[in-house]
Image: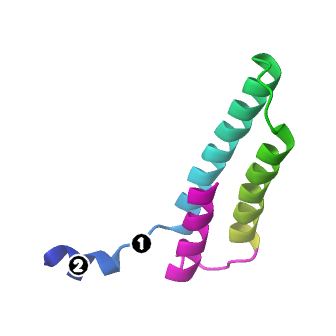
Amino acid sequence: MKFFETSKYYSLKKSTYIVLRWIAIIGQLISVNLVYFYFNFKFDFINCNLIIFFGILSNIYLIYVYNTTQLSNRTDLFVHSKNIIQ
């Protein structure tokens, strides 16, 4: 199939992925804090923010430690698995 032959040449740039993750993190922080403080829903607020904080740490890792423009398959698998679990 042509898709499998050509798809190995395309990958997500690291900068695009990081920008998308910052948008997601900001949305998550706004949502969790709005629901907890404004709507007064009682849930484990600290653990929710800690999970979002791990997303912030993974972005900082990608920005400052991982010094390539493309994500490797292993790093991509790790970061996407973390996002799914989050």
User: Which residue type does callout 2 highlight?
Assistant: Phe
- Identify the image quadrant of the N terminus: bottom left
Tell me which label, 2 or 1, sits earlier in the chain.
2
Location of residue 60 in the rendering, given as x and y in whole percent from the top left corner: 75, 64
Which residue occupies 68% across, 46% down?
A: 25
Extreme-right residue of the structure: 46
The one of 5 and 45 positioned closer to us in this rendering: 45
Is 79 included in the stretch rendered in magenta?
yes
Disc 2 vs disc 1: Cβ atoms closer than 8 Å? no
Identify the residue shown where x is 74% and y is 50%: 52
> Helix, strand, or loop for circle 2?
helix
Which of the 4 quarters of the picture holds residue 3? bottom left
Q: Which residue is mark 1?
A: 11
On screen, residue 84 versus residue 1, left or right, reads right
Which kind of residue does numbered mark 1 sit on?
Ser
Residue 69 visible here: no
Tell me which residue sits at (53%, 74%) in the image: 77
Residue denoted by label 2: 4
Residue 4 percent location from the top left of the image: 23, 78
Left or right? Give the position of 83 relative to 51.
Answer: left
Badge 2: residue crowd in 10 Å (few <14, some 14–19, many ≥20): few
Task: Work out whether 40 lies above or below 82.
Answer: above
Span shown in magenta: 65-86
Q: Position of residue 2 (x, y in %)?
A: 14, 77
Query: Any mark on residue 37, and which?
Result: none
